[in-house]
Amino acid sequence: MIKDGVIIFFYVDDIIVAYHSKQESEAMKAINQIQEKYACTGGDNLQWFLGVEVIRDRKQKTIQLSQAAYADKISQLASRQDIRHDTPMSGMELRPRSDLAEPSEINRYQRKIGSLLFAAVTTRPDIAFATSRLARFLVNPSTEHQDAADRVLLYLKKTESLALELGRGDGLEVASDASFADNTLDRKSSQGYAIKLFGGLIAWRASKQDTVTTSTTEAELLALSQVAKQRCQQASQAGLILIDCRSQTILWDVPLCTSLYIVCDLQSIRIKPA
């Protein structure tokens, strides 16, 4: 909610009030109105929110979002401690399990992946790809899947000092990429995108594409269309310029049925109302 230059974030019963020093009187008025209706605690400078530590450096004019404590906590879920974890995952492709996993194995694996997903979507984009892949095996995990999940947990613990930093630079930066047909089971491509605002990541995603593409170009354009849609949403929320993606012209005259999906997907985000 935004009112009189004051931004108020609600998540269940957790509240953040953000404002410029020029709007302090309006902010205090909003806070008082909330406190009149509800019994509230806190009210100090923001240090923690939903388990995320907020580290503010006024001299450098930066804010860091850290989940070091959370990474340390969930590392205890790892069944093994002797797995190499210099990177979130190895280059070996994980295969589906042929037999059925025990309920206890499924429960243990789901706890690991659920815990990793929270970090992956909150402050740790570096584990987004690995966690996305591991989430495909939630129903029937194997020993290899358990070990791969342990590797991400241990990597997170080893790199717990890493944090998202906001405040350096200006403007909006957008990037996307795709890995053509890298999933050998169905030959779908992997894709990812990242959006930076004021020098820090504000949105990212790593996933498998929904359709099989027939070329690197198609895979890259599908990834581009996803980040373009996300950018339109972010731009609308932040009051920034809207995107006019002209990339679909690349495939306009390609006489392939497989390109029609790409053209329609990109056409859907070509023009956005102001």
Image (cartoon, grey):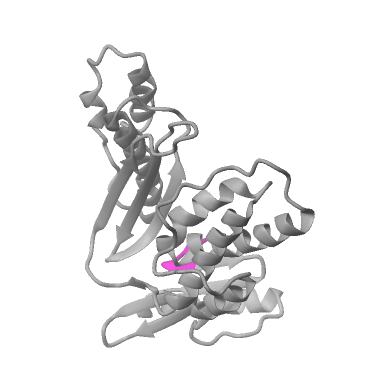
In the rendered image, the vertical position of residue 57 relative to residue 206, given as above or below: below
Q: Is residue 69 left or right of residue 182?
A: right
In this orientation, which residue lies closer to the viewer: 202 or 109?
109
On the question of residue 267 being in view, the answer is yes
Task: Tell me which residue sits at (27%, 11%) in the image.
Answer: 255
Task: Tell me which residue sits at (49%, 61%) in the image.
Answer: 120
Q: Is residue 53 left or right of residue 248?
A: right
Task: Tell me which residue sits at (49%, 59%) in the image.
Answer: 121
Quarter placement of the C terminus: top left
In this orientation, which residue lies closer to the viewer: 104 or 65?
104
Q: Is residue 147 left or right of residue 103?
A: left
What is the tally of numbered marks visible in this picture? 0
Residue 112 drawn at (x, y percent)? 62, 63
In the rendered image, the vertical position of residue 19 relative to residue 225, given as above or below: below
The answer to which image quadrant residue 220 occupies is top left
Q: Is residue 252 left or right of residue 154?
A: left
In this orientation, which residue lies closer to the viewer: 77 or 239?
77
Q: Is residue 32 magenta?
A: no
Spot the residue most to the top: 255
Residue 62 drawn at (x, y percent)? 31, 78
Residue 53 drawn at (x, y percent)? 49, 79
Q: Is residue 6 magenta?
A: yes
Residue 191 drawn at (x, y percent)? 38, 43
Task: Tell me which residue sits at (37%, 56%) in the image.
Answer: 238
In this orientation, which residue lies closer to the viewer: 7 or 95?
95
In the rendered image, the vertical position of residue 252 relative to residue 103, given as above or below: above
Span of residues in magenta: 1-7
On the question of residue 30 being in view, the answer is no
Spot the residue most to the right: 103
